[in-house]
Amino acid sequence: MSAHDQMRAMLDQLMGTARNGESNRYSTKFYDNKVCKSFLLGCCPHEILASTRMDLGECPKVHDLALRADYENASKSKDYYYDVDSMEHLQAFIADCDRRTEAAKKRLAETQEELTAEVAAKANAVHELAEEIGKKLAKAEALGEAGQVEESMKLMSEIDELRARKTKAEHEYRSAIPASSYQQQKLRVCEVCSAYLGIHDNDVRLADHFGGKLHLGFLAIREKLIELEKTAGPRQKELRKNGRRDGGFDDDRPRSRFVGSRELDRRSRALVRDKDRDRRDNRGERKRSSERTERSERTERSDRSERSERRRSKSRERRSRSRDRHSRERDRDRRDRDRDRGDRDRRRRSRSRERSRR
């Protein structure tokens, strides 16, 4: 976003759609059904969880900062009961998330080795201390970045005490189970965001989790829901009693379908299927690559064998030619020796005849 667009968004957020005196510039009004009422109150899960591992995607309703400013100005003189709508939206979303958390716990109970009550209590003690350290460490880092050094140092001293308690709890847990079982990762599900946390996770990993956008986003949603239940809950009962609304919606307005964690589960399953397909494609590609490599190696071995055979054949031919040459040379030497011997015999016989004649 350019600096000009940022300035325009800031002015829209501050002054609304009529900031230039153009009241008819926007065809969409904040009270239209297609406008996200949770966004108007700053608590839409689509916006809060954007760019996280559980990104819900784009909200099916309209998000516009200028419309939020219009609503804030209009709500000063009239109650639109959008806090009730937002509360019911967040209740449906959190209920789906809690079902997701319970399903994850059930899967862990089925897959992980069952512990005795005593060992489970000691493991939970380690988990709780680790989570508390992670939360305080993330908070200390945030305070340090904000320049509140003294508060951050105070938290670090508390973290040191918690680490000492955690070390003692880990020793008790280690002594209660076999050494082979201790090496196995014991997981638990985060009650806020449904993420998996391990008993052997270090402080940095836990601080990254509790200070991460995903966990803080779910925490903000849950805190906003608690706040809305306190303020909008009694008004919701009053509205239902008067018959003006059914479940938080006017009778003349269609009920909207919110995208909650069920949609997130669907997208997660689609993501898992995509990853499985990618893994299968990768395995197929690796298999094809292995086959190509094997064929290449076989071809190379065959070529090396052929080259070696040709070299051996040439060597045999050279040795054969060398033997033939040596054989011819020996025959020639033998003939020369035989000729020389014959010449000597003839000369000897000739001298013998000459002596006998004398």
Image: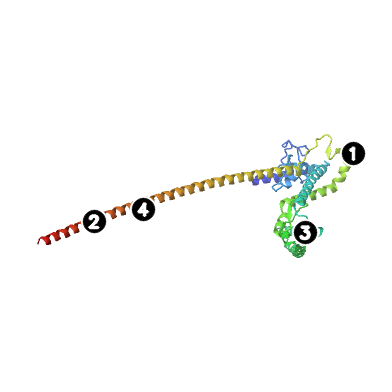
> According to the image, label 2 marks what residue?
338
Label 2 vs label 4, nearer the camera: 2
> According to the image, label 4 marks what residue?
319
Which callout, 3 or 4, points at the residue further toward the start of the chain? 3
Instruction: Kindly report the distance in space between the C-alpha atoms of the residues bearing marks 2 and 4.
Output: 28 Å
Classify 287 as above or below 23.
Answer: below
Q: Position of residue 335 (x, y in %)?
A: 25, 54
In the rendered structure, which amino acid carries the disc numbered 1? Asn
Label 1 vs label 2, nearer the camera: 2
In the rendered structure, which amino acid carries the disc numbered 4? Arg
Which callout, 2 or 4, points at the residue further toward the start of the chain? 4
Q: Quadrant of residue 19?
A: top right
Q: Is 237 placed left or right of 195 in the picture?
A: right
Please tell me whether mark 3 sits on a helix, a strand or a loop.
helix
Instruction: Kindly report the distance in space between the C-alpha atoms of the residues bearing marks 2 and 3.
Output: 107 Å
Please tell me whether mark 1 sits on a helix, a strand or a loop.
helix
In the rendered structure, which amino acid carries the disc numbered 2? Asp
Which callout, 2 or 3, points at the residue further toward the start of the chain? 3
Closer to the camera, 61 or 13?
Answer: 61
Which callout, 1 or 2, points at the residue further toward the start of the chain? 1
